[in-house]
Amino acid sequence: MRKLLRKINTTLVVLLIILSFDYGNLLFSSEDIAAVKNRHETWIMNLPGVVGTAIGDCQGSPCIKVYIKEKNPELERQIPKQLEGFKLDIEVIGPIKILPN
C-alpha cells in the first residue's frame, strides 16, 4: 500500500511540474503583458491614427494589439514590432464612433 501511495504521489508531482511548464508561462505572461501594455498605452494612443489597444492572441502567444483607423505606412513605422519582449500586432479597424445611448 505504501509503494502504491508513493507512486501516486510521484506521478502527481511529475504531472504538476509538466503542467506548470506548459501553462505557467501563459499565466505569468498575462500579468506581465498587462503591465507592459499599461506602461506604454499613453504614448501609443497619442500617435495620430491609433484608435485603441488591447491584449490579444497572436498565433498562440499573448500580444499587444494596436488598432488603427486606416492603413498608414508612416504610422506603422512609428509602432515598434515588440515592447519588452511582447509582439505588437497592428490591425486596421477604421474609426471608432461613440453611439448615442
Image (cartoon, grey):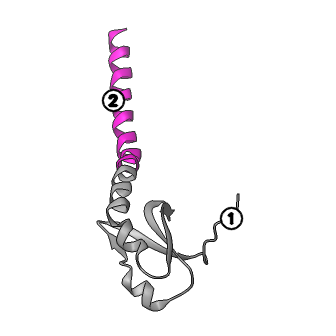
Disc 2 element:
helix
Q: Residue furthest left?
A: 84
| Residue kind at label 1, given as amino acid type | Leu
x, y (%) of residue 47?
41, 79
Residue at image x 35%, y 72%? 43
In the image, taking residue 79 as reference, residue 66 lies left or right, namely right
Question: Which is more toward the observer, 36 or 21?
Answer: 36
Is the residue 54 above or below the residue 29 in the image? below
CB atoms of marks 1 and 2 within 8 Å: no
Specify the label residue 13 is tagged with.
Answer: 2
Residue at image x 50%, y 69%? 52
Q: Residue furthest front?
A: 101
Residue at image x 36%, y 41%? 20
- The magenta segment: 1-28
- Mark earlier in primary sequence (1, 2): 2
**Magenta portion: prevailing SS class:** helix
Name which quarter of the figure residue 2 lies in.
top left
Question: Which is more toward the observer, 32 or 40?
Answer: 40
Q: Which residue lies furthest to the right in this view?
A: 101
Q: Which corner quadrant holds the C terminus?
A: bottom right
Is the residue 68 above or below the residue 40 in the image? below
Question: Which is more toward the observer, 64 or 40?
Answer: 40
Q: Is residue 12 magenta?
A: yes
Q: Does the magenta stretch include residue 101?
A: no
Is the residue 55 above or below the residue 83 in the image? above
Specify the label residue 99 is tagged with.
Answer: 1
Is the residue 60 above or below the residue 10 in the image? below
Q: How crowded is mark 1: few (under 14 residues within 10 Å), some or many (20 or more)?
A: few
